[in-house]
Amino acid sequence: MKVTIHIWDLPHRLFHWLLAASVVAAYVTAKIGGALIDWHGRIGIFILGLLIFRIVWGFIGSTHSRFVTFFPTFSRLSAYLKGRWEGIGHNPLGALSVIALLATLAVQVGTGLFANDDIAFQGPFFDFIDKDLSDKLTSWHNSSLNVLLGLIGLHLAAIVYYRAAKKTNLVKPMLTGKKEIPVALAEAIDAGHGNRAGGVRFALSLFISSTVTWGAAGGITQLSKITRITSPCCSFAWASGEITQQHQATAPATRQQQIAQAPASF
């Protein structure tokens, strides 16, 4: 006999499907190239925001979204391989897959921020480094794609395997948030397994991820310009420099005027 429990919260599920769609869109726009390469960059920044949200949510989100709940420690991996692991969220091998995917995507996005294609595209942080380093990061960006595609392939293969061999549907819970588990397992789980994060934590996670996304999309550059203009210290330095230049420019003329106005006997 089985019972239905709520396992995946709405933010977690939205992240999952938005990330899947964004990765597909980023891959397609990169392959087509041309005018779509700018959209590839925009989608990459959006993926960065999703990753930041997931990292924050992994610490303050609901129970089964938190890294501490499913992090694949040695003891958990050992118990799973020996058939002794009991849980309702990510199993230890699945957790390894999740962490590997997130890490690889982080490398993809991080290098993409500094990348260039020697034609028309430059990442938003291209100007912060020299061209040689940008070329190296571009190479890493391209080569890590193969790792990402391999991990996605393993992820899809695991879904098919669990569906065919273990009669377990991994897709449905990520759509509905609900999962069927044996009654014995449900009774053995701590009663607080379904703790939810609430609106305040969701708003905080969204604010942090949105701020990072804004910064990566050019907000950092705009902020630095505003700071340079409005900061008292910077304004003083700028004004001092301008006054010095004006003084140097007018000094010769002033001395000539003094000589011309001086008495002949002097």
Image: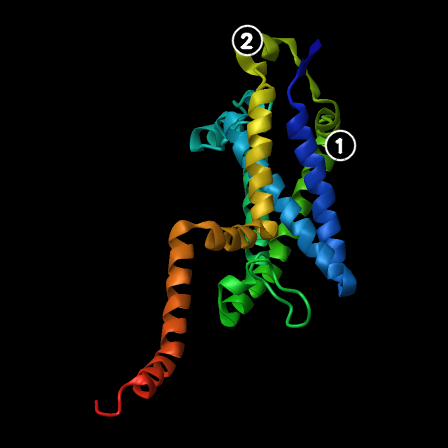
Is residue 93 visible in this depiction of the protein? no
For label 1, the residue is 164
Q: Nearer the viewer, residue 98 or 185?
A: 98
User: Which element is circle 2 on?
Assistant: helix
Is there any visible trace of residue 68 in the rendered image? Answer: yes
Q: Where does residue 31 sit, x and y in percent of width and height?
A: 75, 61
Residue at the image point whose x is 30% and y is 87% from the top: 259
* Residue at 49% in and 67% down: 133
Q: Around disc 1, counting alpha carbons within 10 Å, would you say few (fewer than 14), some (14 to 19), or many (20 or more)?
A: few
Going from the N terminus, do you reach mark 1 or mark 2 first? 1
Query: In this picture, is 256 found above or below 54?
Result: below
Q: Which residue is mark 2?
A: 191
Amino acid at dot 2: Ala
Q: Where is residue 124 shown, x and y percent of the image?
A: 59, 58
Looking at the image, which residue sits at the far bottom? Answer: 264
Residue 20's quadrant in the figure? top right
Image coordinates for residue 144, horizontal then vertical, percent: 59, 57
Query: Vertically, is 206 above or below 228?
Result: above
Q: Is residue 23 left or right of residue 256?
A: right
Q: Is residue 142 left or right of residue 127?
A: right
Based on the displayed image, in which of its 4 quarters is residue 75 positioned? Answer: top left
Report the disc number at residue 125. Answer: none
Quadrant of residue 141 in the image? bottom right
Disc 1 element: helix
The residue nearer to you, when weighing 208 against 251, is 251
Please state the horizontal and vertical placement of residue 1, each as a whole percent of the image. Answer: 71, 9
